Amino acid sequence: MRQDGGRSVRNGGDLVVETLEALGAKTVFGIPGQHALGLFDAMGRGNLKFVSSRVENNSAFAADGYSRATGEVGVLFLSTGPGALTSLAGLQEAYATGVPMVVIASQIPLEGLGARRKGMLHQLDDQKASAANVTKSQRLIQHASGIPSAIQDAWTDAISSPQGPVWVEIPQNVLLEPIMVPPVEDALAVAADNPPRVELVREAVRWLHAARRPAVIAGGGTRRGHAEKALLSFAERLRAPVICTPGGNGAFPWEHPLSLQSWIEDRHMTDLLEDADVLVVIGSSLGEVTSNYFTFEPRGRIIQIDAEPRVLESNRPGLGIRADAGQALDALNAALDAALPGALEGERPVPDWHGKSPEEVVADSLADVRARLASQDLGKELRFMADIRAAVPDDMQTFWDMTISAYWAWSCWDARQGQFHSAQGAGGLGFGFPAAIGGSVGLATVGKPARVLAVSGDGSAMYSISELATARQHNVPVTWLIVDDGGYGILREYMVGAFGKATATELARPDFVALAESFGVPARRVPVDGVREALEAGFAADGPNVVVVETLLKMFAPTHLEA
């Protein structure tokens, strides 16, 4: 805002901030940059809280974590060129996982856009084209009067299923030049409805009515569609075993008699799911991990529900239902009740898994998994994961990087009343700690307990080590567990298994304790059997802290290689 003869003159930056506040935004993540200074100057006149990361990719992860933890839209401010491009790997994770975010990126002045190559600092031929592969939609605003409507439309895109990040870029001069547009007083963004088609629901119910061995795969779309209660009701109506994918972890109660938990990479589970006569796949593409690395060969019929139409039948033929998971399950439950009222319940085929009840099949399958694990030398790994679970309060949210501990957690982590978040959408390194920072900030913003856990390996920790400064600056209550095995542990294991030796997987070990302490963050190194006590102490402390465990963990043997 400039002064013009004693009068305050508003600019495009003010419109951005006013619109975001009117839409309900409370917190923004990012890093200032030359062309984006109009945004940051305007923030100083508004009520948005700004959390400055040290690397733009980590800002994207933080905005992602904020959204996952709170269910609200994450907001990210980026500068032009290198700043914008550095965020793309983080946006890929949000896009792959369906996390709603609004990204406001600055742009060079309008006179340099198009075919006019003026050699301006940070200039790209088409900046938003770089974001097209990792965001739902992209917009370039060329006039300040279009800012409120464009951001409102972008916000609507972000929250409409399939949810995801959206990209809005605004040239430097549009942010800075005086405007005649009055202050934004209200803005409304309502998610587009995404119900299932009635004839598809009717056909699905016909299949389910005749099913003797129905089963369910609950993917990440189940959680994004807030379909947990509807899923529980659906499974209990059908007495259908339910398994959760890594993204769907927590969508179904872990200890429920119908819960196959999350052992999606185990051949015992693959065998059971292949035997289902009707398999309901909710919010999953049946991709690499969910299909046990494409070894899954179902013999029954598939009903696939997903908000993203490109996912339907992308890996397996079936009855594809394009819909939000929550709306679809609500419609199926209502249709099942209408088709099968209580008086007619006896007309339904009794679930029969070759002479066993669904509950018996679930119990037997979990026992088979436990027996398979017990046959391998995995005592240290099983104790380590159990100790982490014992230390973490039931309602605490956890954020996991791409590391061996996380690969274990995909299968064995009982989220209880907390939430499990991992980077398995795109699979990039560096997610855990910055996402946990964003999640913690978000939880505090909405008035919930803000202590969270981040888990990384030493390799992935180095991607985000600079964010110790962010955590310290904002006194964010994140406990960061770093499992240090001196290299890229999972890649080492893959290479040894495939080639007999590992190449280029070893890393020089920094002293993570000294490094954290240099940022003013308390840290301690503990043996592998001391992780529970160390985490409990970290959870009881104030602000950020780090726990380092130097150990080499192994993965359980892959069963897809046995098929």
Image: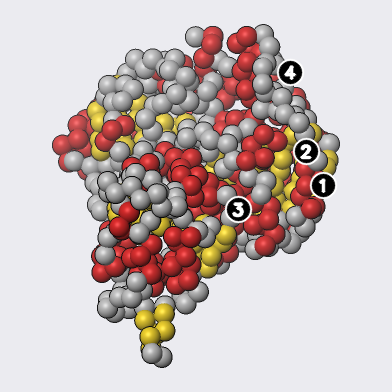
- Badge 2 or badge 3: first in the primary sequence: 3
Compute the Cα span from label 2 to label 3: 19 Å
Amino acid type, residue under disc 4 in the picture: Asp
Q: Residue at x 30, y 75 (%)?
A: 179
Tell me the SS state at disc 1: helix
Callout 2–callout 3 Cβ contact below 8 Å: no
Amino acid type, residue under disc 1 in the picture: Ala
- Badge 3 or badge 1: first in the primary sequence: 3
**Horizontal placement of 530 versus 315: left or right?**
right
Quick one: which residue is furthest to the front in this view?
A: 118
Please give the residue where the numbered disc 3 appears in the rendered image. 54
Callout 3–callout 1 Cβ contact below 8 Å: no
Q: Residue at x 76, y 31 (%)?
A: 508
Question: Which image quadrant is residue 125 in?
Answer: top left
Mark nearer the viewer, 3 or 4? 3
**Horizontal placement of 154 versus 72: left or right?**
left
Callout 3–callout 4 Cβ contact below 8 Å: no
Compute the Cα span from label 3 to label 4: 41 Å
The circle drawn on residue 510 is: 2
Coloring scheme used: secondary structure
Q: Residue at x 77, y 43 (%)?
A: 512
Callout 4–callout 2 Cβ contact below 8 Å: no
